[in-house]
């Protein structure tokens, strides 16, 4: 490389980097940076002496590049959720980026940064004019998406903190501000109405917001912190708060400790099962009381869908009977499909649901020729209505898994009802009793667990 002329700008320090010769070729420098990135060490250009650099052979360059590309593909597939403390942000991908969103790449500073106002300003700048994301790589765009997701949770946490302050200022007469969260036991009569008016929400929604804000302040500080940092969403915070509603402060904190280490990467359904299991473990008697109380409010709900159709749903029903009903619906949907009724399985299951309730048979009619004479045709079906038929000798099949300690009454630990999730020890015992009464299941001991049978 030719030396710079006197007319070239000298930069800030009078010794511009672009005026010095580079002992490495572009390919060698790229491979060197890739290797440092793979080792998780930042390159120190000041300590690297160009005179000590030994050029890499073509084989070494190819081997380094192949390894880096393969590793990047593996981690891209395994990355999962991005953000602080999540496995998707635990590695730095090889390579360089000159885009305005470079710091949002995997393992980079802003990808590992908890949600805050500073992160919002950085994400806004990286998004570019009119949110065009011009020049942003796919990996960086996913990092920005994860950052906006964390910021959405952060804003929800800040909003709930403001709702908690409204709760404090609206304390009912005689209710002191007590405890670590300095929250009163109750708020004034029209507090929910005022909040609903300010947010253009229903009173029920406003009161739910007030209850959630209080729970996060008083009983669930870990959940509140995870929401504020953007590790969990508001929906996940609501799942934890609802599951721990009947627990006292110590029990609620013990239950949240069971799930917070993985709550950020669990789906809402998986988190719901995990926190339910934690509540049953921490306070089994309260879990039982909650289930039994809720069962007294078993009901069927109907409402109009936005499309103009309607919905019908049963709530707070016995888990084992729900599983049996579901299997019967699936069986009749299969019969409808075999008979040639058009539609996907969701549509056929819905039709089967209505058939079983209304004692109808929606299988297509089969034309048959009448015997004798001039002939003719009559419409007929194979078999009667679904209400009078049973699938292959049983109504439903239930698989219940329980710890041996629960089976032997040595401890009150939750079991698992396949297809529904965790069940408290008393429901576990009740289901096993019903199974024995209906049929004669053969329990099987396996890895310390018991699995039983048909009902």
Image: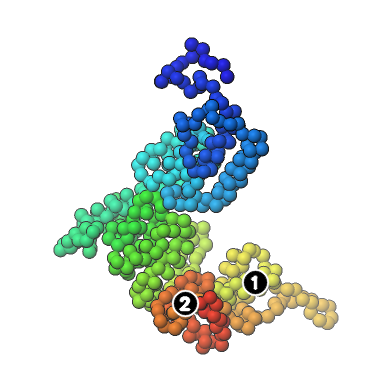
The image shows residue 259 at horizontal and vertical percentages of 41, 62
Direction from residue 45 to residue 163 in the image, left or right: left
Q: Position of residue 277 (x, y in %)?
A: 42, 69
Residue at left offset 55%, top offset 83%: 443
Position of 415 with respect to 247 (left or right) is: right
**Residue, disc 1:** 334
**Residue 324 appears in the rendering:** no
Left or right: 245 with respect to 379? Answer: left
* Contact flag, marks 2 and 1 (Cβ < 8 Å): no
Circle 2 Cα neighbour tier, 10 Å, few/some/many (<14 / 14–19 / ≥20)? many
Q: Residue furthest right?
A: 373
Of tags 2 and 1, the one toward the viewer is: 2
Which image quadrant for residue 238?
bottom left
Which residue is at the far top? 6
Q: Nearer the viewer, residue 268 or 220?
A: 220
Between the C-alphas of marks 2 and 1, the distance is: 35 Å
Q: Quadrant of residue 281?
A: bottom left
Q: Which mark is residue 85?
A: none
In the figure, 273 relative to 115: above or below?
A: below
Q: Residue at x 83, y 82 (%)?
A: 372
Q: Is residue 54 above or below residue 230?
A: above
- Closest to the observer: 56 or 290? 56
Q: Residue at x 59, y 28 (%)?
A: 25
The N terminus sits in image quarter:
top right
How crowded pointer 1 is (Cα within 10 Å; few <14, some 14-19, many 20+) is rated as some
Where residue 227 appears, x then y in whole percent? 37, 53
Rendered location of residue 369, percent (x, y)? 79, 77
User: Which quadrant of the figure contains the C terminus?
Assistant: bottom right
What label does residue 403 carry, if any?
2
């Amino acid at each position: 490389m030719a030396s710079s002329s006197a007319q070239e700008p000298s930069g800030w320090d009078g010794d511009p980097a672009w005026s010095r010769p580079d002992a490495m070729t572009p390919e060698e420098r790229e491979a060197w940076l890739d290797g440092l990135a793979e080792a998780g060490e930042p390159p120190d250009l000041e300590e690297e002496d160009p005179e000590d650099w030994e050029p890499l052979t073509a084989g070494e360059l190819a081997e380094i590049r192949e390894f880096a590309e393969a590793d990047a593909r593996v981690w891209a597939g395994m990355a999962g959720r991005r953000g602080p403390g999540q496995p998707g942000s635990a590695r730095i991908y090889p390579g360089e980026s000159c885009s305005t969103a470079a710091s949002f790449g995997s393992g980079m500073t802003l990808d590992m940064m908890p949600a805050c106002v500073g992160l919002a300003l950085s994400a806004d700048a990286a998004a570019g004019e009119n949110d065009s994301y011009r020049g942003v790589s796919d990996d960086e765009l996913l990092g920005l998406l994860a950052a906006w997701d964390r910021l959405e949770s952060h804003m929800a946490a800040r909003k709930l903190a403001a709702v908690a302050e409204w709760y404090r200022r609206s304390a009912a007469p005689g209710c002191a501000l007590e405890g670590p969260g300095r929250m009163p036991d109750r708020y004034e009569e029209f507090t929910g109405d005022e909040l609903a008016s300010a947010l253009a929400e229903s009173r029920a929604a406003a009161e739910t917001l007030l209850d959630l804000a209080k729970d996060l302040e008083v009983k669930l500080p870990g959940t509140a912190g995870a929401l504020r940092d953007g590790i969990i969403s508001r929906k996940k915070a609501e799942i934890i708060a609802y599951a721990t509603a009947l627990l006292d402060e110590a029990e609620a904190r013990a239950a949240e400790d069971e799930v917070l280490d993985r709550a950020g990467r669990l789906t809402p359904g998986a988190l719901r099962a995990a926190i339910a299991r934690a509540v049953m473990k921490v306070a089994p008697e309260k879990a039982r009381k909650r289930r039994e109380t809720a069962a007294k409010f078993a009901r069927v709900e109907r409402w109009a869908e936005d499309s103009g159709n309607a919905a019908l749903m049963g709530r707070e029903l016995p888990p084992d009977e729900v599983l049996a009903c579901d299997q019967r619906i699936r069986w009749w949907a299969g019969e409808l499909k075999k008979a040639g009724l058009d539609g996907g399985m969701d549509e056929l299951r819905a039709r089967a649901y209505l058939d079983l309730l209304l004692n109808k048979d929606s299988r297509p009619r089969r034309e048959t020729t009448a015997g004798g004479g001039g002939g003719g045709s009559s419409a007929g079906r194979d078999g009667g209505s679904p209400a009078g038929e049973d699938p292959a000798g049983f109504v439903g099949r239930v698989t219940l898994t329980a710890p041996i300690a629960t089976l032997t009454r040595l401890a009150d630990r939750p079991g698992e009802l396949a297809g529904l999730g965790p069940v408290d020890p008393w429901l576990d015992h009740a289901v096993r009793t019903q199974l024995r009464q209906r049929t004669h299941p053969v329990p099987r001991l396996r890895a310390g667990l018991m699995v039983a049978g048909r009902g």
